[in-house]
Structure formats: C-alpha cells, structure tokens
C-alpha cells in the first residue's frame, strides 16, 4: 500500500528488496551482567525505509535501539558483542566517538522530552550546540524545522511559549523536529506514539512516512497495526531472539514462523 | 472495644506529640521575637558593641556574620556543586565513591566545635592566618561542604532522566549535557539548598570561636582598603559574628545591659534565620514556576 | 526539505575518535578535572581533620606524659595545681549522660510525631509540621542556649531546686535541639516503607495502632535507630548551648540538678586561656580527639544499620 500512495519514491528507488542497507547488524549478542538480553541477532536496517521492530515487552527491541547510538554504554553490566556495520565502521567499536555518532544517528523517546524552555529554544539549543546556524538564518532554520514536522502552522504565533504548554502529540513532534535539526542520517524511534491519542498518533505516522524519503527510520513499536500501516520491513523479536525479519506485507500476510503467526493473531504478548 | 480504645489513645498521643512540636516552635519564636522587639532599634543595629558600658549595639557583628557567610559561600558553592555533580554524574560504583560517601557522612556528623579546633590548629596556627575572617570562612567551608554536596547531588538526581537522555541523544557531550541541560533544571533546588545552608552557616558559632575569633577591630566603614587593619573588607582581621557575640555576652559579658543585648541580638539572629528559611522556599517556588510555565 | 549535509567522507573519518591531544581548552577534560578535584578536596578535608586532630590529640600522652588510663577513668581534674592531674571522667560522663538522656527523652516524642506526620495526618504533617521542623533545625544553638539561660535556668531554680544551672537544663536544651532531627529522619524511615505493608495489615482488620506497632515499627526500626543515633551525634557535639546552662563545674554531678560539664564545654571554656602545647592545653585536644572518635563510631553504627535496612 505504501508504494501505491507514493509513486515517485517508487520511481526513484529500487524495489524494497534491493534497498541499500544503512545499518547491518551482524551476530549481535547483548548482555546485562549475566543476563543474555539479545542472542545472535542478524538484521539489515534498510536505507530510506521504515524498519519496524516489534515484539512483546522485554524482548530486547529497545535494547537494540540503544545499542546502535550507544546510549547503553553507561548501564552497569552492559556488554555488546558482534557488529553493527554503518558505512565502513562497526558502531560497537570502542574507538567510536559517541558524541559524533549520536549527531548522525538521532533518537526519539517514548515519552516526549522537550527541554523546559520555549518552543523556539528547543530547536535553537541543539543548533547552537553544534554550531549549525548563523545569526541571520537562526529563526529561518527554526521555521523550516518546525514546518518539516508540520508543527509550524500550529505554533508559529507562540514560539516563545514553554514547550510544556504543547499537547502530547505536539511535544513529540517538537522532539522529532529537534532531532532533525542537527541533520541525522538515521532516526531511532522508541515507541514514539505509544503515549499519544489516536489522532496524534496518526500525525506522527504520517510524519514518519514523509521522513523516510530522506532518512533511515528505525521504529520500535508494540503496536502491530502501526507496523503494518507504515513499516516497509518488520522484524519480530521474542525473548531476545530475532524470530523473523521480512517485508512488512509479507510478514503480516504470510509469516514463515509459527511464533510470528501466533503473535500476529494475538495468541501471546 | 478495647482495641478501638487503644487505637484512639495512640492516635491522641501521637497527635499530642506533633502538636507539642508546633507549640514549642511557636513559643520559642514568640518569646525570642517578643523580648527582642523591645530592644531592637535602629541605634542598636547601627552602633558599635561596648565591652563595659551599657548601650552597645551589634553593627560590626552583623556585618561580620554576613561577611564570613559571603566568603564561606564563595568557597563552598563551587566545590559543593562540583562535588554534587561528581556524585550524581561521574561517580561509578567503586571504592573511591564509597570512600567519598563515607567522608561526606563523617564530615556531616563531625561536631562543629571539633571543626573549630581543626581551624585553630591548621588555618589559624599552621597557616599563620591568626583569628581571621579567612580562617573562619575556611572552617565553615568544611562545616558546610557535606551539606552542599548532598544538596547538589540530590538536585542533579531529581532532574528527570529523560532530560539527560534528550541531551545525550542530540550529541551533547557529558559535560555539555550537565552544564546546559541538567544544571538549569536543577538550579531552583540548588539555590534553595544554598540559601538554607546559608542560614545554618549564619547561625553557627562553635566553629568560629577559635577560628574567626571573639573580637573585632574598630571597623571604619569608610575604609575600603582591604589590606587596612580597620577596613571591614580585610579578610585577615579577627571577626566576631553575631552568634558568637550572643554567646559571649551571655556567658562572659560584663556590661550592665547583658540581658538587653542578648534579647536584641537573639531576635536579630532569629529574624535573619527566618528570612533565609522563608526566602529559600519562596525563591525556589518562584523560579520553578518561571521555568516550567510561560 | 532541508538538504542533508551529505559528505563524501567515510563514516570512519567522522565517527572514529581522533587521537586528540588532551588540550587545556577541551571542556570535557576540564569538567572532569573540576569535579574530580572537588571529590578529592572532600577526601582531603576529612583526612586532614582526622590526621591533624589525632596527632595533636595524642600530644598529651606522649609529650605531656599523661597516663591515658588516668585521663579516661579519674574524676580528678586539677590542671593548674602544684601537682596537676588530668582526669576527664567527669566531662566524659557529662557528655554521655546528656547524650543518652536526651536521646531517651526525644525518641518517643520524635517517633510519635513522625507517626503523626506519616500515618495519621500526612497532608497536615506536610503542610505544617514539615516547615515547622525545618525552621527548628535552622535555629542556631546559641539561641537555644540563650533561651535556656533566660527561661529554663530560672524556672528550674524557682520551681525544682538547685541553682538552675544543671545537668537537667543541659539535657532539656539538647533535647529540644535534636527533636527536629530525630523527627524528620524518623518520618523518612516511615515514608520509605512500601504502602502494601499498611494496606495488607489494615485489610486483615488491624487497627491503625496495631498496624503501627506490629508491622510498621518493627520494619522501620533500623531507620528509626539511625534517626536516634544521628540525633545523638548532634547531641554529643553540641557545645555552646550546653555550656550556657550546665553550670560548668569540674566535679562529677550526683543528681540531675547538680551543675556539670561536658567535653565540649570544657574545650569551649579553656581553649582560649591555656598556652598552646602546655599539658593543660593538650588534654583539651585529647578531648577533641575523643569527640572525633565518638562521632566516627556513630557514623559507623549508622552505616551498619543502613546495611541492615530493608526499605
């Protein structure tokens, strides 16, 4: 269904199966102390696509996300083995500059976490932090950025109000805008719409569909319908294991594994 | 029936204990302020103390209290803030951290008179500072440091983890996350903590007896040369604070109006402490509101 | 759409940490230096206090040749006589009795008030009692001493007996001073208990008092003991307020109404008039060291209890 609604993408891009791989996860094992959280995961994350990771709580899907941008480095007992190949580097390599990495691989969290500042400053602060602005273009950049997430029309007249005055969905779009402001290549989203009402959720989903034109999107969700609606590829995790990875349509219409079929039909999870 | 009666009796007893505390505070403050109000006048606040004659004031002592407080805070706030940041953001679960925690607990429960003795031994004698503003402020720094570190650590820890994650995920370095995201959020609690601890420092006397001393030179408020013996700004001069003065007057004063000076001094001291206390609360709430609304 | 800053560089050039020289301008490194220095200062301060006071406190034994056993067990304090003796038992006794007695008085009050704050009327407790207690904590000890001197001492003299300057006055003043500490920390101990403990006991038909006595008090006990011990730590170190009301004799008191002295009061009074490094001065440092040791002991006790604390 995705390809029908977006014909130009189809023209510009090859068929999903042959899409380039942005992040190649190979033989990834993750431990928290003695607990083996992820076991031998092999998963190619496709460029310019929405890649959904689904599975019941505790299956390790968020752990993958937080290993990619190395947010788990400070967790006591955390250990990752294997490869997450990105261009010509392994992101798990200890010489990786995590600060540079996180600029390139942005992250959006489950609970919207704008800074307790004005709407405009939420965008301006990261721009300033990374020197991505000049005096003349700062407000222009904020505008472009908010337009990108469809927030400009809603907030243009109150940019100096606290970000906390926004609704939940608006906050989350502001957080996405903030992540986009520093030009990442990949965006990791950890259940970004699970705390939102259906309308706000739909807006986020529409936004993600437009974002995949320019970014690689990796979406953790426990909402199967959401994955079915917007993801190009779906990976199903169960108890730290990658059970099945496939083109979304194929995954939902014709799962190869019994556990996938059980999960889709709501038999567990 | 019996069961219910015991329950009621217990409730009544605990309520009585709690009421007692409120009554005690009200009585204490009421007494001090009531006795003091009759003694405190502009003249009392702005005239020099007198050793033998009646009619002495507390001008120099009040100035000394604030001046020593100022220097104590100049030393304590940076170290306490950095220490709190260390404990909240850098400390790993290792021996060093455990050791620092023990040090903080030990310092916090050290008797202030013992800290005063240390000040006498090291700052006054070994470093040859003599009884001085500086020696007093350094001694009080040790007194205040554990409080400050704890305050700042708790303030940093109370910032939601989501804020820190937002910073990290945006490619902020650890230090930039701390300074641009965590510190501004923690600022209201830190400020409240600073003011509350300032109240404790302002009232402290035992640590100062033998570090800042129990006398004050004849201060000339027109003399702004910090190296002059009579300048109030000189940090190498002895400086009797208001608390020390109250103690000295009460326990070894020989002027005829001991009682009047004690009443007035105590009232001024308690008023200052109340202002610190209530001020801390009000400023904390105000800043918090300013940050999160608008 | 915002153009992506696509570079032709390989990711390895962007993401692998360059072997940056640790330059003085690197804020990351400077920040680390700053916070580690502060941690170091804290350790240094603690060690310095301990080492200097230990060194100075032992002078009386190896320099002035005072017998440690006599110092600890004799009540004969006569440092300025022709045949000086330095028995500090009266002061040690004074300190310990003030500490223990005030803890005994305050424990039921503080814990009772804490139960009121947490179990009976939490909203009232939070709105009124909490600020009241915080203000009480902030009131300087000289103010307590002044109140003791002007209210309590005359009251004891007129209504109970003796000169008024007495062990009793000292105990009462110190009790008032540690009451807020004990109350707050006890309330914390109760607040830490999980709510399920209360509801399950109440669901079994227990009254509130039964719940408190049989479930909450035993579970909170390590925390309550910690509260009392920290109160005692404050009591044993209190100097000026006691000094103002206790009468300051060097004789062992035989009743609560007798004047007495504590380690802190004798230090307070005599440190100023004795010559540095004289025997009389050295014993004062020894008393200071003893205070330090006692305070260390209490901290260790608190740590021991914290390890046993379940909530």
Image (cartoon, rainbow, N blue to C red):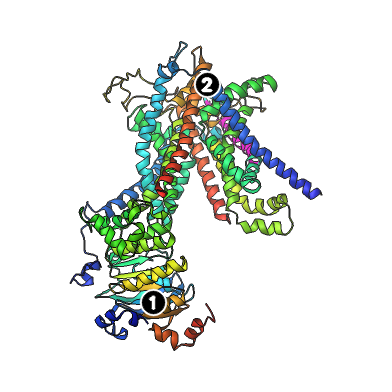
Please report the residue visible at 76 percent of the width from the left and 46 percent of the height from the top.
B6
Please report the residue visible at 38 percent of the width from the left and 21 percent of the height from the top.
B216
Most extreme residue toward the right, as rendered?
A: B1
Depth-wise, is mark 2 or mark 1 nearer the camera? Answer: 1
Tell me, yes or no, whether the highlighted magenta stretch contains residue C293.
no
Q: Quadrant of residue A166?
A: bottom left
Residue at label 1? A230
Q: Is residue A69 left or right of residue B268?
A: left
Q: Secondary structure at mark 2?
A: helix
Viewer can see residue B204: no
Chain at tag 1: A
Query: Mostly what secondary structure, the magenta segment?
Result: helix
Label 2: how many residues lie within 10 Å, few (<14), some (14-19) or many (20+)?
A: many
Query: Which of C32 and A185 lies nearest the eye of the viewer?
Result: A185
Q: Quadrant of the N terminus of chain A?
A: bottom left
Q: Are marks 2 and 1 on the same chain?
A: no
Query: Which of B254 and B147 lies nearest the eye of the viewer?
Result: B147
Where residue B126 appears, x then y in whole percent? 34, 32
Q: Which mark is residue B46?
A: none
Chain at tag 2: B
Q: Which residues are magenta?
A: C85-107
**Rendered view: B279 above or below C19:** above
Residue at label 2? B36
Please report the residue visible at 46 percent of the width from the left and 77 percent of the height from the top.
A224
Where residue A115 appears, x then y in whole percent? 37, 55
**Rendered view: A262 above or below B73:** below
Query: Which of C257 and A254 lies nearest the eye of the viewer?
Result: A254
Q: CA distance from mark 2 to mark 1?
A: 75 Å
Please report the residue visible at 55 percent of the width from the left and 25 percent of the height from the top.
B32
């Amino acid at each position: 269904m995705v390809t029908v609604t977006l014909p130009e993408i189809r023209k510009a891009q090859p068929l999903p199966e042959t899409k380039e791989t942005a992040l190649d996860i190979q033989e990834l094992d993750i431990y928290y102390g003695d607990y083996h959280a992820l076991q031998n995961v092999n998963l190619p994350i496709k460029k310019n696509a929405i890649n959904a990771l689904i599975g019941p709580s505790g299956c390790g899907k968020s752990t993958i996300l937080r290993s990619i941008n190395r947010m788990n480095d400070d967790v006591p007992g955390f250990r990752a083995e294997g490869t997450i190949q990105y261009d010509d580097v392994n992101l798990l390599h200890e010489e990786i500059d995590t600060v540079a990495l996180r600029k390139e691989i942005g992250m959006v969290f489950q609970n919207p976490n704008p800074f307790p500042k004005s709407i405009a400053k939420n965008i301006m602060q990261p721009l300033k932090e990374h020197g991505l602005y000049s005096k003349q273009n700062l407000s222009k950049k904020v505008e472009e950025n908010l337009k990108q997430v469809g927030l400009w029309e809603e907030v243009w007249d109150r940019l100096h109000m606290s970000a906390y005055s926004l609704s939940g969905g608006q906050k989350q779009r502001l957080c996405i805008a903030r992540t986009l402001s520093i030009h990442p290549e990949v965006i990791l989203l950890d259940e970004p719409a699970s705390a939102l009402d259906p309308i706000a959720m739909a807006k986020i989903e529409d936004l993600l569909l437009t974002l995949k034109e320019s970014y690689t999107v990796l979406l953790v969700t426990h909402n199967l319908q959401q994955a079915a609606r917007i993801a190009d590829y779906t990976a199903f995790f169960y108890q730290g294991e990658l059970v099945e990875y496939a083109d979304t349509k194929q995954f939902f219409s014709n799962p190869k594994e019994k556990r996938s079929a059980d999960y889709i039909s709501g038999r567990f999870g | 029936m019996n069961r219910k009666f015991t329950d009621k009796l217990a409730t009544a007893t605990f309520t009585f204990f709690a009421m007692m505390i409120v009554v005690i505070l009200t009585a204490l403050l009421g007494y001090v302020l009531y006795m003091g109000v009759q003694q405190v006048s502009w003249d009392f606040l702005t005239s020099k103390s007198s050793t033998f004659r009646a009619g002495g004031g507390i001008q120099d002592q009040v100035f000394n209290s604030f001046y020593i407080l100022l220097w104590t805070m100049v030393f304590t706030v940076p170290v306490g803030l950095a220490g709190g940041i260390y404990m909240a953001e850098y400390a790993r679960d290792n021996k060093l951290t455990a050791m620092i925690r023990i040090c903080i607990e030990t310092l916090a429960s050290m008797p202030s008179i013992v800290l005063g003795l240390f000040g006498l031994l090291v700052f006054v004698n070994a470093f040859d500072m003599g009884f001085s503003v500086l020696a007093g402020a350094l001694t009080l720094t040790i007194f205040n440091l554990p409080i400050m570190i704890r305050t700042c650590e708790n303030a940093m820890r109370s910032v939601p983890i989501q804020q820190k994650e937002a910073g990290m995920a945006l490619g902020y370095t650890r230090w930039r996350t701390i300074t641009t995201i965590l510190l501004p959020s923690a600022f209201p609690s830190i400020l409240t903590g600073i003011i509350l601890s300032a109240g404790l420092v302002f009232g402290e006397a035992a640590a100062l007896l033998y570090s800042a001393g129990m006398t004050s030179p004849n201060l000339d408020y027109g003399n702004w040369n910090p190296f002059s013996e009579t300048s109030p700004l000189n940090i190498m001069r002895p400086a009797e604070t208001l608390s020390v003065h109250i103690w000295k007057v009460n326990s070894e004063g020989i002027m005829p109006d001991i009682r009047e000076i004690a009443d007035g001094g105590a009232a001024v001291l308690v008023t200052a402490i109340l202002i610190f206390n209530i001020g801390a609360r009000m400023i904390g709430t105000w800043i918090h509101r300013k940050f999160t609304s608008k | 759409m915002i153009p992506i800053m696509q570079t032709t560089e390989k990711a390895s050039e962007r993401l692998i940490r360059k072997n940056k020289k640790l330059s003085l301008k690197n804020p990351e490194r400077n920040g680390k230096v700053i916070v580690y220095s502060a941690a170091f200062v804290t350790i240094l301060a603690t060690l310095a206090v301990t080492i200097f006071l230990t060194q100075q406190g032992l002078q009386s034994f190896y320099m002035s040749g005072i017998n440690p056993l006599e110092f600890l067990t004799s009540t004969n304090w006569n440092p300025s006589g022709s045949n000086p003796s330095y028995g500090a038992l009266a002061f040690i006794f004074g300190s310990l009795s003030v500490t223990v007695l005030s803890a005994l008085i305050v424990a039921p009050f503080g814990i009772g008030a804490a139960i009121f704050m947490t179990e009976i009327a939490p909203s009232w407790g939070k709105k009124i009692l909490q600020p009241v207690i915080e203000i009480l904590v902030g009131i300087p000890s000289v103010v307590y001493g002044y109140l003791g001197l002007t209210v309590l001492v005359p009251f004891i003299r007129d209504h109970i007996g003796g000169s008024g300057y007495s062990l009793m006055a000292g105990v009462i003043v110190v009790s008032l001073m540690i009451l807020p500490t004990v109350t707050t920390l006890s309330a914390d101990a109760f607040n830490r208990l999980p709510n399920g403990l209360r509801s399950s006991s109440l669901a079994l038909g227990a009254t509130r008092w039964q719940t408190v006595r049989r479930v909450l008090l035993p579970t909170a006990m390590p925390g309550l003991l910690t509260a009392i011990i920290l109160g005692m730590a404050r009591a044993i170190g209190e100097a000026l307020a006691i000094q103002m009301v206790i009468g300051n004799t060097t004789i062992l008191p035989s009743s609560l109404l007798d004047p007495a002295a504590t380690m802190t009061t004798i230090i307070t009074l005599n440190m100023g008039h004795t010559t540095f490094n004289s025997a009389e001065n050295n014993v004062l440092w020894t008393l200071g060291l003893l205070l330090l040791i006692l305070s260390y002991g209490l901290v260790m006790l608190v740590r021991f209890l914290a390890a046993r604390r379940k909530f």
